[in-house]
């Protein structure tokens, strides 16, 4: 699938009739919302160069970390909404569709959540009460402000079975149902999502489909499934992406691309997932582009983005949102995952805050 504007290959930016550069949100206005995940320096205004990009290019935002349990609820009985409030205020001020990420996850959840005061494992009822308190407090605080929530994040294994997280071990499989019920009660108007990586792989995809169907049968209004989109140059294929979007849309829900980036650096493992716990030692052979990306590689990256967005546009009736995981290459998590200290080039804006040929490639596809 090679639908690609020739001008974009040379980094020539498309313009509107008035001569101004076309923005992502204008180019995508008839297709889907387009957004980015923000870090604290961005939504607080400290990184003014990134803020200028965000305000100009995007109409939806996600938080990288400030709404995860360890950030907003670090200790028992103690909530800290300082940073989260700034994030929501930024979105409201700029009239953006605001995403809450995330409520229930096996990572970045403090150990105390699953223990009593003596450090012993909680029982089912006690953990359910703790979950309910967290969801009602966090979702309730932003009722009518945060438009959609990643209620449960990454609950499915690569083989399609449910992950043996502490949530599942202590509560049982119905922890999923309870999380969505609590979120719905806390804000009946908010959209509720399931978010995961590697759903393009059929075993995991089938497991996630089974999970959504079960939730639907139990009356849970799952509005969308988020395909995280932590992609590589050779995975997934455009056919896999196409078939995955089709499979989830058949459930009668929307599909979102929630954490899009492109890892073109040499892989230290054959694993295609996005487990944040993976950590490999830095080696020169794993970090080949410290002085910049060769033109030939940049063109391949641009083509890869063009091919993917061609699929997204074809599914515009099913896709409600495409969100990049970061604003510029400089603040991408891929600089430090799964190898700390690398120089990554996964996004549409470079370290100089200027649009790359990947930007032109995407504009060339969506601006039809």
Image (tube, helix red, strand yellow):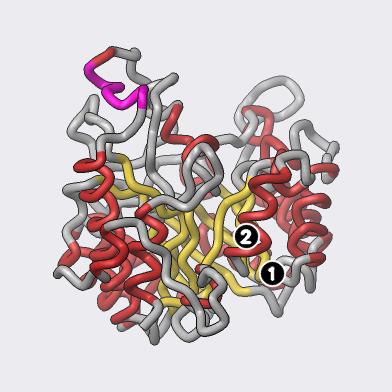
Q: Secondary structure at mark 2?
A: strand
Q: Classify 61 as above or below 365.
A: above
Using the rendered image of the protein, determine whether residue 125 is visible from the camera's viewpoint.
no
* In this rendering, position of residue 37 left or right of residue 301: right
Q: Classify 353 as above or below 61.
A: above
Question: Measuring 41% from the left and 50% from the top, which residue is drawn there?
Answer: 356
Q: Where residue 96 is drawn, which disc sits there? A: 1
Q: Are marks 1 and 2 in contact (CB under 8 Å)?
A: yes
Label 1 vs 2, first from the N-terminus: 2
Question: Measuring 25% from the left and 41% from the top, which residue is drawn there?
Answer: 295
Which residues are the magenta region?
285-291
Using the rendered image of the protein, determine whether residue 320 is visible from the camera's viewpoint.
yes
Q: Classify 252 as above or below 363.
A: below
* In this rendering, position of residue 236 left or right of residue 54: left
Q: Position of residue 52 (x, y in %)?
A: 68, 54
- 334 or 217, nearer to the observer: 334
Question: Measuring 79% from the left and 43% from the top, which residue is drawn there?
Answer: 83
Q: Position of residue 25 (x, y in %)?
A: 55, 72
* In this rendering, position of residue 178 left or right of residue 303: right
Q: Secondary structure at mark 1?
A: loop
What main secondary structure does the magenta stretch of the protein show? loop
Question: Measuring 14% from the left and 69% from the top, which residue is drawn there?
Answer: 1
**Number of numbered callouts drawn:** 2
How far apart in space, not on screen, are marks 1 and 2 (Cα)? 7 Å
Say whether residue 192 is magenta. Answer: no
- 79 or 214, nearer to the observer: 79
- Name the residue that disc number 2 marks: 61
Image quadrant containing the C terminus: bottom left
Q: Position of residue 196 (x, y in %)?
A: 40, 54
């Amino acid at each position: 699938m090679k639908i690609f504007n020739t001008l974009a290959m040379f980094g020539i930016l498309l313009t509107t009739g008035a001569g101004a550069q076309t923005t992502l949100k204008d180019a995508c206005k008839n297709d889907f919302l387009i957004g980015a995940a923000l870090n604290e320096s961005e939504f607080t205004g400290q990184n003014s160069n990134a803020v200028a990009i965000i305000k100009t290019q995007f109409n939806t935002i996600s938080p990288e970390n400030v709404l995860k349990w360890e950030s907003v609820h670090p200790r028992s009985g103690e909530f800290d909404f300082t940073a989260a409030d700034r994030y929501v205020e930024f979105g409201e001020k700029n009239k953006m569709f605001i995403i809450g990420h995330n409520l229930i996850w096996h990572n970045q959840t403090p150990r105390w959540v699953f223990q009593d005061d003596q450090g012993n494992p909680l029982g089912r009822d006690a953990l359910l009460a703790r979950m309910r308190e967290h969801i009602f407090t966090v979702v309730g605080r932003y009722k009518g402000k945060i438009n959609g929530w990643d209620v449960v994040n990454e609950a499915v294994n690569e083989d399609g079975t449910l992950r043996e997280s502490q949530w599942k071990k202590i509560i049982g499989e119905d922890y999923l149902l309870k999380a969505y019920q609590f979120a719905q009660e806390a804000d009946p108007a908010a959209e509720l999502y399931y978010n995961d990586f590697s759903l393009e792989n059929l075993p995991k995809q089938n497991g996630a489909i089974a999970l959504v169907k079960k939730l639907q049968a139990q009356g849970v209004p799952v509005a969308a499934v988020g395909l995280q989109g932590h992609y590589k140059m050779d995975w997934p294929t455009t056919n896999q992406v196409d078939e995955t979007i089709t499979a989830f849309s058949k459930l009668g829900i929307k599909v979102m691309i929630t954490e899009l980036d492109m890892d073109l650096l040499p892989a230290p493992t054959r694993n295609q997932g996005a487990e944040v716990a993976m950590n490999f030692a830095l080696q020169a052979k794993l970090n080949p582009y410290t002085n910049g990306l060769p033109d030939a590689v940049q063109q391949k990256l641009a083509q890869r983005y063009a091919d993917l967005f061609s699929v997204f546009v074809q599914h515009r009736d099913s896709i409600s949102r495409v969100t990049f995981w970061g604003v510029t290459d400089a603040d991408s998590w891929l600089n430090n995952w799964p190898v700390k200290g690398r120089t990554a080039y996964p996004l549409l804006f470079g370290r100089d805050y200027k649009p790359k040929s990947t930007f032109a490639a995407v504009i060339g596809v969506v601006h039809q």
